[in-house]
Amino acid sequence: DAGVTQSPTHLIKTRGQQVTLRCSPKSGHDTVSWYQQALGQGPQFIFQYYEEEERQRGNFPDRFSGHQFPNYSSELNVNALLLGDSALYLCASSSLHRDWSYEQYFGPGTRLTVT
Amino acid sequence: DAKTTQPNSMESNEEEPVHLPCNHSTISGTDYIHWYRQLPSQGPEYVIHGLTSNVNNRMASLAIAEDRKSSTLILHRATLRDAAVYYCILRDGPGYNQGGKLIFGQGTELSVKP
């Protein structure tokens, strides 16, 4: 079992550009959540996808959008990048129906640097 | 969202027990207490969770106060590999309409000395 995988591992973008991050959930999982972790801070919830729909959303602007595909993989898109978007972006997968405790499995993250 | 309070940092010696405290005075009756940890350069990983009773698993033990306003994560014998940031998180219980986001605080940075 490969666990949760994310790509790319590192990314450097310029202010104003757009970025797409990708996540493949752990085998058997149907729910994907995205988190942003600034340096020295705990992860902050961005949104969660289930059955290809956004199920919950944190306090992030509309510049942050996502998508979930029929195979449960997911993308996080950020438009009009700001310097403050520099962070580690974490993907977590879980199974809403199978695992009642909703333990979330995290990937290693994508380190985004905006210059 | 219910809030938790943890010490910023703690130190431990290798092979000694570690008690990591967490205060959650505004916990509601349906909130589960979850612990995750984040090793350097990795994503967070689940450690343990509980509702009212103390819990044990292969990684750790969770002691929950009778009034549920505080809990303690216990690592029975700390190893160098246990050096990480430990997060105490409150989550709604099982059910389709719950179990979504994790609200992370600052966590406790645990250092383990050989």
Image (cartoon, coloured by chain):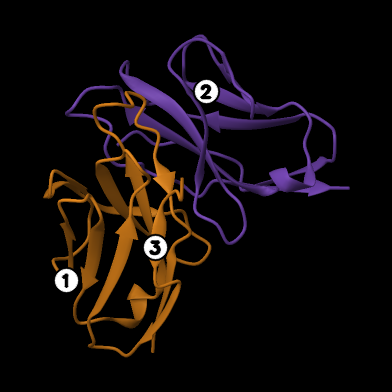
Chain colours: A orange, B purple
Distance (Cα) linking label 2 and label 1: 38 Å
Q: Quadrant of residue B24?
A: top left
Asked if the residues shown at circle 3 and circle 1 are in contact, with their CB atoms under 8 angstroms apart, the answer is: no
Q: Would you place residue B55 above or below residue A93 in this image? A: above
**Chain containing the residue with disc 1:** A
**Which of the numbered marks, if any, corresponds to residue B70?**
2
Q: Determine the residue positioned at 46% across, 53% down.
A: A42
Outermost residue on the right side: it is B114
Q: Which amino acid type corresponds to the residue marked 3 in the rendered image?
A: Gln
Q: Are labels 3 and 1 assigned to the same chain?
A: yes
Q: Quadrant of residue B82?
A: top right
Q: Position of residue B87 (x, y in %)?
A: 52, 41
Q: Determine the residue positioned at 34% across, 33% down.
A: B2
**Chain containing the residue with disc 2:** B
Whichever of callouts 3 and 1 sits on the residue coming sooner in the sequence is: 3
Viewer-nearest of discs 3 and 1: 3
Q: Secondary structure at mark 3?
A: strand
Q: Secondary structure at mark 2?
A: strand
Q: Which residue is mark 3?
A: A6
Q: Determine the residue positioned at 50% across, 67% down.
A: A39
Q: Position of residue B92 (x, y in %)?
A: 30, 27
Q: Secondary structure at mark 1?
A: loop
Q: 10 Å neighbourhood of mark 2: few (<14), some, or many (≥20)?
A: some
